Amino acid sequence: MLPNWPLAAQTEEHALLMQSIVDPFCASQLAPFAKEFDATGNFPQEAVTVAGSLGLMGMMVDPTSGGAGLDTVAYCLALEAIASHCASTAVILSVNNSLVCGPLEHFGSPWQKETFLTPLAAGKKLGCFALSEPGAGSDPAHLRLRATKKADGSYVLNGTKNWITNGKEADIAIVFATLDPALKHKGIAAFIVPTKTQGFTVSKLEDKLGITASSTAQLFFDDVGIPSTHLLGTEGEGLKIALHTLDGGRIGIASQALGIALAAFEASKRFVLEREQFGAPLAKLQAIQFFIADMAVRLQSARLLTFAAAELKDAGKPYSKQAAMAKLAASEAAMWITTKAIQVHGGYGYTKDYPVERHFRDAKITEIYEGTSEIQRLVIAANELIP
Ligand code: CAA
């Protein structure tokens, strides 16, 4: 499901991708089951497996590394459509695509790409991005998970990571650790950690307001031994890898937010055209028309910002500020639109008989993960205020 609002960035290839792959995937794997995924909190394994077989787990990865070789605009279109049906599946895919395949493709050695990226991009393995910690959420420069370098060049990891999407199911984790806290962010390194490594455990699963079918885990590292070949980039480069990766991730979360908002918008339109009060459909009331108009404007404004960021990324130009603007606008639009969607549904909107309460619960996280709205404002202001 996408709005009938053509964007300059959309090409015939994008339309073909949507018609031949994404829409059938949504119709067969998500639309009939999204409500159940939400109610049970069960990981949508079948949908993720099918997504992998369709190239949706490594959409932007080069085909030489097992990916679909699509551009970021295609990724946005696909994620928006997927999120309009199931926000949990959207974030599972977004993390694997943006936060795991992304840094492996950009910073990985040929061996790392062949060994880790290829199965991740093909959907044969699932990844997670382990940056946040109990004491380091918005401020990852002060993370405490400790990497100790041994005489043979290998590393040992000790510590805890929090709020890790896909943490329960992941085969491979991109883990950020400090070699020396005194060096502040220049002491941080990124490691590729197979989750079957001894000492790695999932210590807690969060019970969440929304996106219930995607796991959010606490990970515990107890003397986890990692060979030197698993260092991603160089020692001291870890925070830059994380922040560079999050720039791309934020475009994905903006698209997820757009999809959630779109679903609430479409549900609201259907409802107000059908539901009669005062002898006429709700859609005849000017107050309701204002809600619908404001939803449309916020949704389309956020879409334009999101696709502008995607186009810059595809053009190889700086896009950090635009990604932050897109995520800020799209997540706040999603929260506003889903709130108003419940309002136009009245009492029905507050029940589980209608989908808008799920969209409302799912929307909230988009204002929090991959950088809160306040962090996006800091990134935007820092870019605007460069002397
Ligand atoms: N790309 C690459 N490098 C960057 C960068 C970027 N976008 N932004 C900054 N850097 C570099 C800087 O150049 C600097 O390096 P040098 O000292 O060598 O020049 C270094 O990183 C530190 O920069 P700052 O001093 O500006 O960084 P900071 O510590 O003040 O933090 C921040 C800035 C914007 C607050 C940043 O910390 C941030 O974005 N925080 C939010 C973190 C976040 O989004 N967490 C989400 C967790 S992941 C998640 O949610 C995953 C999930 O499972 C869904």
Image (cartoon, rainbow, N blue to C red):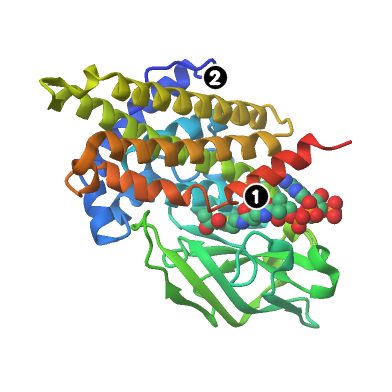
Whether 176 is drawn above or below 66: the answer is below
In which quadrant is the C terminus drawn? Answer: top right
- Expressed as whole percent of the image width and height from the top left, the position of residue 165 reads 48, 60
Tell me if 36 is positioned left or right of 280 in this view: right
Q: Secondary structure at mark 1?
A: helix
Place residue 283 in its image quadrant. top left
Tell me if 318 is positioned left or right of 117 in this view: right
Residue situated furthest front in the rendering = 278
Q: Which amino acid type is shown beneath numbered disc 1? A: Ile
Q: Which residue is mark 2?
A: 9
Q: Secondary structure at mark 2?
A: loop
Q: In the image, is the residue at mark 1 within 8 Å of ligand 1 by its beta carbon?
A: yes
Q: Which amino acid type is shown beneath numbered disc 2? A: Ala
**Residue placed at 24% from the left, 40% from the top?**
31
Asked whether the beta carbons under mark 2 and mark 1 sit within 8 Å of each other, the answer is: no
Residue situated furthest left in the rendering = 279
Place residue 147 in its image quadrant. bottom right
Residue 79 in view: no
- Expressed as whole percent of the image width and height from the top left, the position of residue 356 reads 28, 41
Whether 190 is drawn above or below 134: the answer is above
**Residue placed at 20% from the left, 24% from the top?**
282
**Number of other residues with Cα within 10 Å of mark 1, as a class: few under 14, some 14 to 19, many 20 or more:** some
Q: Which mark is residue 261?
A: none
| 278, 155: nearer the viewer | 278
| 179, 38: nearer the viewer | 38
Place residue 184 in its image quadrant. bottom right
| 355, 126: nearer the viewer | 355
| 308, 138: nearer the viewer | 138
- Expressed as whole percent of the image width and height from the top left, the position of residue 268 reads 27, 30
Q: Which mark is residue 375?
A: 1
